[in-house]
């Protein structure tokens, strides 16, 4: 076996761009090319496998890939369909958020799932949902163009991924029940070879840093010394703010990392409490 770490990512689809962007932010250099399934990093002992998202859990289970980036929806479907799969879940990555939901044609009045034919690419998840909710319905498994099936007589309703809702809307369908919320997830093989474990640990830790940093912001502002406490209280998830005295004795500068998005409402509240020269900066990397 090679000592190079292999990471499986989706070749084309909702996860692809963000997945390769994330790996680049972790310092892994490679050239993306549309016809290659195997990308060799030029600066790290890493190879990237560009595959169908549906294949990623199995590749990681079989230890053909050490790491993979996959949607929780696909992972759950595969785990339910094959109980022998052994995969470690690492970090939720915060992108490619979507949900798996039932939908019905707008002119179908009754949204009851009982005795309906339901078309889906997620038969195991739907089966699980139906049995847990004691619903008796028929599942029609289909891959691709699920949204068309009610109009060609194959199904009464569908269960499919929804993100913006545009696909449902443009096919005259309306959402009824959510089955699962999903986002991209980092998964890891449970059979990592010793020779690769240090590098894999490093990559996982870098991915965690990038994800944590992307939620975080650095905020700086000036204020009167008397307002320090009330202003710091307004900061979302602030990590030990730094207070720096300014030339004007009654004034200070406050700097802090905030582990959450800083919304306009917070900035307006800070201003109202006397803060001035407020500056919010993105954080690229955050290591502990
Ligand atoms: C899903 C789903 C819809 C679309 C919904 O397919 O099947 O076609 O996304 O998104 P919207 O609500 O923003 O319109 P996807 O592109 O994920 O393909 P895949 O399931 O074959 O990977
Ligand atoms: Zn897919």
Image: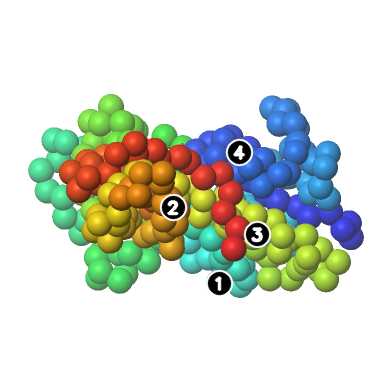
| 239 relative to 156 in the view: left or right | right
Point 60% across, 68% down: residue: 88
The numbered mark, 3 or 1, whose residue comes first in the sequence reads: 1
Looking at the picture, does residue 234 appear above or below residue 165?
A: below
Observer-side mark, 2 or 3, equals 2
| Mark 4 or 2, nearer chain start | 4
Between 52 and 270, the residue placed more toward the observer is 270
Q: Nearer the viewer, mark 2 or mark 1?
A: 2
Q: Earlier in the sequence, mark 2 or mark 3?
A: 3
Question: Where does the image place residue 219, in percent across and percent down from the top left?
Answer: 40, 46
Q: CA distance from mark 4 to mark 2?
A: 36 Å
Residue position marked by numbered label 4 in the rendering: 21
Say above or below: 238 vs 44: below
Which of discs 4 and 2 lies nearer the camera? The answer is 2
Give the quadrant of residue 137.
Answer: bottom left
Give me the disc on residue 204. Answer: 3
Location of the N terminus (image quadrant) = bottom right
* Foreground tag (3 vs 1): 3
Element type where label 1 sits in the image: loop
Q: Which residue is mark 2?
A: 244
Q: Are marks 4 and 2 in contact (CB under 8 Å)?
A: no
Question: Disc 2 to disc 3, how far (Cα)?
Answer: 35 Å
User: CA separation, marks 4 and 3?
Assistant: 15 Å
Which sits in the foreground, 5 or 131? Answer: 5
Question: Where is mark 1, residue-wise?
Answer: 83
Whether residue 85 is visible to the viewer of this picture, yes or no, is no
Q: In this figure, what is the number of numbered marks?
A: 4
Q: Residue at x 41, y 46 (%)?
A: 246
């Amino acid at each position: 076996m090679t000592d190079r770490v292999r990471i499986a990512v989706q070749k084309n689809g909702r996860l692809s761009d963000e997945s390769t962007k994330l790996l680049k932010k972790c310092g892994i250099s490679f050239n993306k090319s549309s016809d290659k399934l195997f990308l060799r990093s030029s600066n790290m002992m890493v190879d990237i496998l560009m595959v169908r998202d549906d294949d990623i859990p199995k590749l990681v289970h079989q230890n053909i890939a050490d790491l993979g980036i996959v949607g929780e929806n696909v992972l759950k479907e595969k785990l339910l369909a094959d109980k022998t799969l052994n995969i470690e879940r690492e970090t939720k990555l915060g992108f490619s958020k979507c949900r798996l939901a039932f939908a019905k044609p707008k002119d179908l009045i009754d949204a009851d799932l009982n005795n309906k034919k339901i078309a889906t690419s997620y038969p195991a998840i739907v089966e699980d949902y139906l049995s847990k909710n004691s619903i008796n319905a028929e599942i029609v498994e289909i891959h691709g163009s699920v949204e068309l099936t009610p109009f060609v007589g194959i199904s009464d309703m569908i269960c499919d991924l929804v993100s913006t809702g545009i696909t449902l809307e443009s096919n005259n369908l309306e959402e009824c029940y959510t089955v699962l919320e999903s986002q991209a997830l980092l998964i890891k093989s449970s059979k990592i070879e010793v020779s690769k474990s240090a590098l894999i640990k490093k990559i996982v830790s870098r991915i965690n840093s990038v994800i944590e940093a992307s939620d975080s912001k650095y905020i700086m502002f000036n204020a009167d010394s008397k307002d320090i406490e009330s202003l710091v209280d307004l900061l979302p998830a602030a990590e030990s703010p730094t207070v720096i005295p300014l030339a004007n004795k009654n004034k200070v500068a406050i700097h802090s990392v905030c582990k959450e998005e800083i919304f306009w409402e917070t900035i307006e509240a800070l201003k109202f409490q006397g803060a001035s020269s407020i500056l919010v900066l993105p954080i690229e990397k955050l290591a502990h």
